[in-house]
């Protein structure tokens, strides 16, 4: 087995990028407008509106649509995981394929099994995140069904209850986001089959892509602007 220093450095860089970006995004979201921070405010406004409605069919349809998206990824993750596990029985063929690729690092039997193990680990983690997200959306459905109605939206107890519903939805969205990040980093992990340097480069590229999309994209600016509009509208509506 030829686990070189470069391979160790590559896998260390991979996990540093993944764990480091997760911690960075979590802390930065507390002080900077981003998709996670602004959508949480939208969820609070949404739940404030929920408690003013007698009939919540629209909310049920929206939540069901969100759950379907997550269920799709959860079921797809199982299929991908099954494919990765199947490759453990085809390591020799995989070695020949990698060996035929120009500039690819020389394939090592045990090292390839480690690389497949990394992919399996990533998709197992993704499956756990997606299924936990689905369960939390189920909890939210129960809370929405149990929510009383307050046409005035001035009842402090119900406003606090609405915030708790938004928190549950926010946690479900975080789990979904973590599952999606696993997919992003799985793309980087695939690069390890070709060369350790490519894994390091791909890990940095994934971090850059995630940062731009979550903190600097046009969608973030639009969601932030929408959040301010909703805040102003709500203040003017209930100040009369």
Image (cartoon, grey):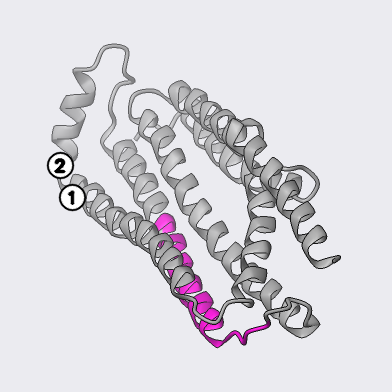
* Residue carrying label 2: 90
Quick one: which residue is furthest to the top in this view? 102
**Left or right of 79, for residue 32:** right
Q: In which quadrant of the rendered view does residue 28 lie?
A: top right
Q: Marks 2 and 1: in contact by CB < 8 Å?
A: yes
Q: Is residue 47 magenta?
A: no
Residue 116 versus residue 235 in the image, above or below? above
Quick one: which residue is furthest to the right in this view? 239
Is residue 184 visible in this depiction of the protein? yes
Quick one: which residue is furthest to the front in this view? 240
Measured from the top left, where is residue 58 in percent x and y?
Answer: 46, 68
Measured from the top left, where is residue 190 in percent x and y?
Answer: 36, 34
Residue 133 versus residue 89 in the image, above or below? below
Residue at 58% across, 28% down: 208
Quadrant where the C terminus is found in the figure: bottom right
Q: Is residue 148 magenta?
A: yes
The secondary structure that most of the magenta stretch takes on is helix
Residue at 63% across, 76% down: 52
* Residue carrying label 1: 86
Residue extent of the magenta highlight: 125-150
Q: Nearer the viewer, residue 239 or 46?
A: 239
Q: Nearer the viewer, residue 26 or 218?
A: 218
Measured from the top left, where is residue 133 in percent x and y?
Answer: 48, 65
Is residue 34 visible in this depiction of the protein? no
Classed neighbour count for the residue bearing mark 1: other residues with Cα under 10 Å, few (<14), some (14–19), many (≥20): few
């Amino acid at each position: 087995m030829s686990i070189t220093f470069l391979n160790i450095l590559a896998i260390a860089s991979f996990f540093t990028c993944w764990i480091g970006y997760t911690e960075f995004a979590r802390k930065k979201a507390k002080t900077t407008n981003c998709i996670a921070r602004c959508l949480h405010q939208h969820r609070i406004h949404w739940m404030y509106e929920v408690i003013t409605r007698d009939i919540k069919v629209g909310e049920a349809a929206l939540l069901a649509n969100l759950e379907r998206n997550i269920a799709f990824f959860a079921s797809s993750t199982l299929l991908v995981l099954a494919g990765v596990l199947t490759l453990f029985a085809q390591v020799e063929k995989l070695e020949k394929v990698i060996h035929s690729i120009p500039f690819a690092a020389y394939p090592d039997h045990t090292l390839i099994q480690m690389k497949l193990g990394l992919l399996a680990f990533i998709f197992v983690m993704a499956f756990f995140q997606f299924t936990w997200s689905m369960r939390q959306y189920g909890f939210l459905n129960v809370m929405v069904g149990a929510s009383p109605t307050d046409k005035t939206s001035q009842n402090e107890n119900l406003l606090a209850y609405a915030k708790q519903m938004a928190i549950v939805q926010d946690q479900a969205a975080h789990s979904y986001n973590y599952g999606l990040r696993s997919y992003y980093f799985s793309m980087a992990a695939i690069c390890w089959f070709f060369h350790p340097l490519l894994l390091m480069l791909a890990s940095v590229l994934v971090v850059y892509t995630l940062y731009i999309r979550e903190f600097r994209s046009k969608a973030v600016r639009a969601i932030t602007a929408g959040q301010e509009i909703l805040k102003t509208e709500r203040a003017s509506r209930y100040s009369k």
